[in-house]
Amino acid sequence: MHDVVGAYQRLNHIYQLYIKSAFPLRYRSLAAERDRLLQQPGILSQPPLIEPVPIYPSSGRDLQTAAKQLPEKYHDLAQLGKMLFEEGIELYQHQWESLKEVLINQKDLVVTTGTGSGKTECFLLPLLAHLAWESSTWEASPPPPSNHCWWDVQGNRVSQCKHVTRPKAMRGLILYPLNALVEDQLRRLRKTLEAPEIHDWLDKERGTNRITFGRYTGQTPIPGEPTTDKIKRLRNELDECAKQQQNLLQCPN
């Protein structure tokens, strides 16, 4: 839609006509007063707020090319991070500079660019590059235990990563001021790390290891140190989630 202001004006006019026709007034003075009220901003509608987005300079490098210009140990970023960019899309200059400053110059950075400028990639790409390099040193992952879904069987809680032989640690911590931002970034992480193409690559090149992530907010069920009561409540929470998943899978397309 190119004429945003014109579209707003037409819609606003249509709604005013609807109110006049659906709720006619006998007296002209009352109708005129209502017209004046409806034309005030915020009564019937709010004028659009338009934020022009500048064209950010391109680095001239897609992810494949950018990864090759990094130190060799980071070259697998082209595979692990490929779901962040559609094929042929070039990195912005500030995204490429972020990669260089973190991975080559070993610097911390602050990115201050506008809306839609790809700030997320500025910190995700260096993180993924480190994960791509470190994961190349991991031993192959054995298959998960038979009671991996421990909440669905009798017995004690079994860690989801108990079978994994690689060093257990938190590799990255991403903080957000709002839950809405967390939800958006979770969607991005799912697309990046849980795509079938990435799982296939991890199976072939990283011994079936997985790069996992999670969310911790005020809505996270059963937080804090594990106790018998908390484990019981967590079992119930996970069991309910599993039932909801099965119901969704059984729904017709």
Image (tube, rainbow, N blue to C red):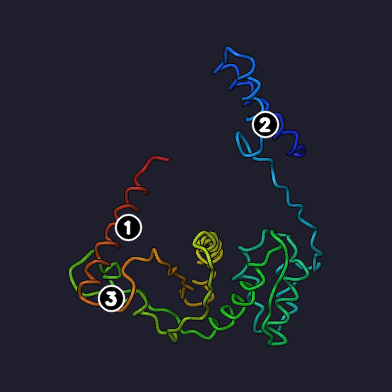
What kind of residue is marked 2?
A: Gln
Q: Residue at the location (46% across, 84% down)?
A: 139
Q: Which residue is mark 2?
A: 39
Q: Nearer the viewer, mark 3 or mark 2?
A: 2
- Percent x, y for residue 202? 51, 72
**What number is the disc on residue 224?**
none
- Percent x, y for residue 188? 56, 62
Q: Residue at the location (64% across, 15% down)?
A: 28
What kind of residue is marked 3?
A: Val
Q: Give the left or right position of residue 62, taking residue 46 as reference.
A: right
Sequence-first disc among 3 and 2: 2
**What number is the disc on residue 158?**
3
Q: Which residue is mark 1?
A: 241
Q: Nearer the viewer, mark 1 or mark 2?
A: 2
Q: CA distance from mark 1 to mark 2?
A: 49 Å
Helix, strand or loop under label 3: loop
Q: Dot 1, how many residues are within 10 Å of its Cα: few (below 14), some (14-19), or many (20+)?
A: few
Quarter of the rendering containing residue 250: top left
Q: CA distance from mark 1 to mark 3?
A: 17 Å
Q: CA distance from mark 3 to mark 2?
A: 63 Å
Q: Residue furthest front?
A: 29
Helix, strand or loop under label 1: helix
Sequence-first disc among 1 and 3: 3
